[in-house]
Amino acid sequence: MELLYGMDPLCGWCYGIGPAIRRVVADQPGLTVRPVLAGPVTGPRVGPYAEMEGYIREASQRLQAVTGRAPSEAFFDMIRRPGVQGDSAPPSVAISAVRQAHPDQVLDFALRVTDAHFSIGADLNDPASYHAILGEMGLALDLPDLQDIRVAQAEWQAGRALGLASFPSLWLVQDGVPVPLAVDYDPARLSDAVAHRL
């Protein structure tokens, strides 16, 4: 059985659910948890990240109340820097590269990328942000061009085939069929819900 975790590293709610996903992994070591992406910030939605600050700050209050996590001031400092774009493609390309080279490490990498983005203000357009995380994980990997939209689109196929439009989303794959699972940001409750379905 497999748990599909529909996510995007630019999604604050995906940052919020990170501890719950990690709890599921810890409590169910035999369960494969696979991140799937769909690229919510693409095409005409790509633009200066600073333009999203008002929306993110407003959403952060609810995020903090529900999950206990919220973007740091380092995150807001980063998005205000000139030239920093809000774009799902670069982190999707990096995650794709890790999925190909180290499939057993892709979930940990995706979670770390999201954490670094929101907690220390890692710019996900900058290859150095990913190299730092790869170094922490003890992985040596030459990343492709982070702007290669073809790689990003290939990575988004799985999520889009599932109809992934709400982030985060969860599915348990039973007998090859993805069955939606209610999202819960409480680590113990989500772990219990997964255990019950297993």
Image: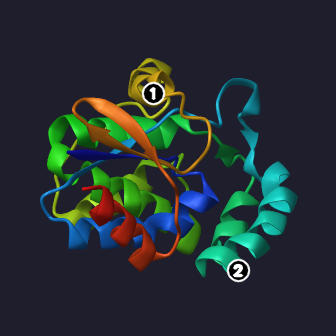
Secondary element at tag 2: helix
Q: Nearer the viewer, mark 1 or mark 2?
A: 2
x and y percent of residue 183 in the render? Answer: 52, 58
Please report contact status of discs 1 and 2: CB closer than 8 Å, yes or no: no
Secondary element at tag 1: helix
Q: Is residue 146 above or below residue 132?
A: above
The colour scheme used to paint the residues is: rainbow
Disc marking residue 152:
1
> Could you tell me the amino acid type at mark 2?
Ala
Which residue is rendered at x = 52% and y = 32% of the image?
Answer: 38
**In the figure, is residue 193 to the left or right of 149?**
left
**In the figure, is residue 123 to the left or right of 94?**
right
Which residue is rendered at x = 50% and y = 75% of the image?
Answer: 186
Query: Quadrant of the rendered structure where residue 101 is?
Result: top left
Which residue is rendered at x = 54% and y = 34% of the image?
Answer: 164
Q: Quadrant of the C terminus?
A: bottom left
Disc marking residue 65:
2
User: What is the residue that sits farthest to the left in this orientation?
Assistant: 30
Look at the image and tell me whether residue 12 can be seen.
Answer: yes
Which residue is rendered at x = 52% and y = 46% of the image?
Answer: 8
Viewer-proximal residue, 48 or 167? 167
Viewer-proximal residue, 57 or 7? 7
x and y percent of residue 95 in the render? Answer: 35, 42
Classed neighbour count for the residue bearing mark 2: other residues with Cα under 10 Å, few (<14), some (14–19), many (≥20)? few
Query: Quadrant of the rendered structure where residue 24 is?
Result: bottom left
Look at the image and tell me whether residue 122 can be seen.
Answer: no
Disc marking residue 49:
none
Q: Is residue 196 above or below residue 47?
A: below
x and y percent of residue 185 in the render? Answer: 53, 69
**In the figure, is residue 38 to the left or right of 41?**
left
Q: CA distance from mark 1 to mark 2?
A: 33 Å
> Could you tell me the amino acid type at mark 1?
Ala
